[in-house]
Amino acid sequence: DKGNHRHFMEKEIHEQPEVISHTLAHYLDFANGTTRKLDLPFDFNGIERLAISACGTAYLAGLVGKYWFERYARLPVDIDIASEFRYREMPLSARDAALFISQSGETADTLASLRYCRKAGMTIGAVVNVRESTIARESDVVLPTLAGPEIGVASTKAFTCQLSVLASLAVRAAAERGKISAEEEKALVRGLSETPRYTNQALQKVERQIEKLARELSHYKHVLYLGRDTNFPLAMEGALKLKEISYIHAEGYAAGELKHGPIALIDEKMPVVVIAPHDRIFEKTVSNMQEVAARGGRIILITDEKGAANATVETMDTIVMPDVPEIISPIVYALPIQLLAYYTAVFMGTDVDQPRNLAKSVTVE
Ligand code: M6R
């Protein structure tokens, strides 16, 4: 049931504050400001590496997870596209753990990777949305996302719930590995607990502006997305979302890679979406935007108040997001990129919930 919404995707975008809240409550004890103890079949202190693999949007959630596990828990993470992981014959250690991320829990390549790791004797965790799925059944521990059924082929609420699980796990791992103090854990949990409020605020603040912008964007043939750090996976997610539902060609790049190739594409016909909250590397992204502007590229900047004030470039549009704690930034910034893809597809008149050639769950290899 779509309720008052035109599409399931629109409904699912708007459900995010609520389902993120449910998901976080499963992993965090808000009253005490701590992560919950999980009944894991491995010990975060006993493993040397964590291998994550998944497909599509779930893979991009895993890529954000890598930044978090390495930054907060100092735990090295290998992250792979599942269809590469299962064939590339890398060394695996039975002492380590593997984590698979899947909304449906039925994706063929992700499942095959899981079985591959099982054979190697690794301990297996699964971040899944469908509790009764094959991937859930075959793993040693299920780390559920509580997103509820996701109907739209384009993944939205499952993605932000996957991020919520991974962020909570990274903080838990950091605490168990003694990499953060009790005070730091409290501060991170406090930051995470504010995600529902900020995602809600973001929807209120930017949705109408993005709808207008999308009308303009729907006239272009190509769009480039740029971001650094956790906004790099988000840039790829923005591009994936746009291409899959609007059929506009889009690419996501690490902003620092611009001058190693994609800059050759920049002209007035190439809008560039830059995802850049005012963080410690913001100035680096500003210089990338200047390179784009100098070549006539049209910039759509998604940032916060401070970023907007310090951007010093002319933009086609600037979307000003609420000021959010660093750890939840990729979760909150996922919303404007979902909205941008959604409204662009609406203006293109495509079948938003059932894009051509795609299936919700890819059960063939
Ligand atoms: O069910 P899964 O999470 O395993 O699916 C993985 C991908 O097929 C999926 O995320 C796909 O990329 C989405 N259509 C993206 O919006």
Image: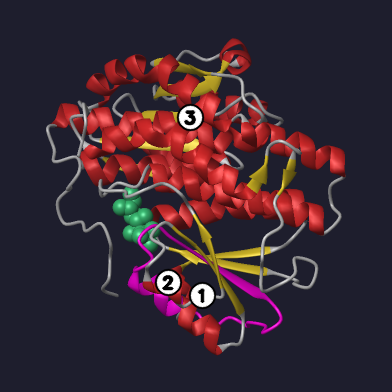
Q: Position of residue 204 (x, y in %)?
A: 42, 16
As drawn, the label of residue 115 is: none
What residue is shown with label 2? 135
Dot 1 or dot 3: first in sequence order is 1
> Is residue 253 visible in this depiction of the protein?
no
Apparent side of residue 222 relative to residue 77 in the rendered image (left or right): left
Magenta-span inclusion, residue 109: yes
What residue is shown with label 3? 274
Do tag 1 and tag 2 residues touch (Cβ < 8 Å)?
yes
Q: Which residues are magenta?
A: 88-113
Q: Nearer the viewer, mark 2 or mark 3?
A: 2
Colour scheme in the image? secondary structure
Q: Amino acid at mark 2?
A: Ile
Report, in whole angstroms, how far the alpha carbon at label 1 lies from the one at label 2. Answer: 6 Å
**Element carrying mark 3:** strand
As drawn, the label of residue 139 is: 1
Question: In which quadrant of the rendered image does the N terminus lie?
Answer: top left
- Which residue sits at x=45%, y=40%? 19
> Is residue 322 visible in this depiction of the protein?
yes
Which class describes the residues within 10 Å of circle 2: few (<14), some (14-19), or many (20+)?
many
Q: Is residue 120 above or below residue 145?
A: below
Q: Quarter of the image holding residue 267?
A: top left
Apparent side of residue 134 relative to residue 353 in the rendered image (left or right): right
Magenta-span inclusion, residue 227: no
Q: Amino acid at mark 3?
A: Val
In the image, 182 versus 61, the foreground residue is 182
Report, in whole angstroms, how far the alpha carbon at label 2 lies from the one at label 3. Answer: 35 Å
Q: Position of residue 317 (x, y in %)?
A: 40, 15
